[in-house]
Image (cartoon, rainbow, N blue to C red):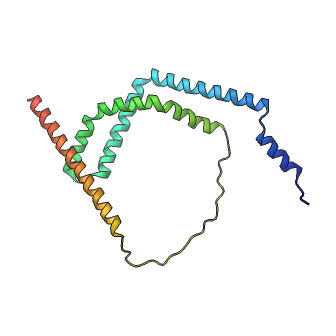
Amino acid sequence: MTIVRQNALNTNVSSSVNTPETLAEKVIEAERMHDVLLLLQNLINSEEATIKLILDCLYDVGSVNLINQKLRVKPLNRVMKLIARMSKPVFRTLALNWFKKNCPQLITDWLHSKVTFESSEKIPQKVAVEVAELQPYPIAPTGNLSQEIKNLRSQVRWLAGISIIAIAVLAVTAIKLN
């Protein structure tokens, strides 16, 4: 014989069955979020100059930080910063198109997640931890080392190619200015 609480049954039934009132609220919610999407698209179209300036600022800061993080060699670092400045108009065009296409929906989804007030508290789960004895100097598998070497060689080829293109562009620019 099994005893079932009546409250437990009521909560399961009410959560699985949508009442007409709940469906109407969902329809209104979807319409209002679509309105938010349209308003954001309108805002982006009317404030295109502001968005371009924001993207320019983000590109300036991001490109310098990325180059400083990835390239520690000073001469190569300076050359890449020059290339980054020259490629800014191309970035602006591509970023603006991406922004217009994707950001209204991303912002709308984010705002919707903020106003749904669903509990997103994650209950910490117990995790089984296996403790292994550490060797004083672990030896890396040769497969990982060879893959890392291949990746580094690939990066060196890319950097060499970019450097050659940058020098060629600088030489052409210097010749045209003279």
Q: Position of residue 115 (x, y in %)?
A: 64, 36
From this view, report whether residue 30 is shown above or below residue 159: above
Q: Position of residue 40 (x, y in %)?
A: 52, 26
Quarter-of-image position of residue 45: top left
Quarter-of-image position of residue 16: top right
Q: Position of residue 8 (x, y in %)?
A: 84, 50
Horizontal side of 103 relative to 21 (left or right) equals: left
Quarter-of-image position of residue 117: top right
Q: Position of residue 176 (x, y in %)?
A: 11, 29
Q: Give the camera-side residue of 24 and 147.
A: 147
- Residue drawn at (25%, 42%) of the image: 81
Horizontal side of 79 relative to 113 (left or right) equals: left
- Residue drawn at (17%, 44%) of the image: 164
- Give the total number of marks visible in the rendering: 0
Q: Give the camera-side residue of 96 and 147.
A: 147
Horizontal side of 110 relative to 84 (left or right) equals: right
From this view, report whether residue 45 is shown above or below residue 95: above
From this view, report whether residue 99 is shown above or below residue 150: above
Screen quadrant of the C terminus: top left
- Residue drawn at (14%, 39%) of the image: 168
- Residue drawn at (66%, 38%) of the image: 116
**Residue extending farthest front:** 1
**Residue extending farthest left:** 178
**Residue extending farthest right:** 1
Screen quadrant of the N terminus: bottom right
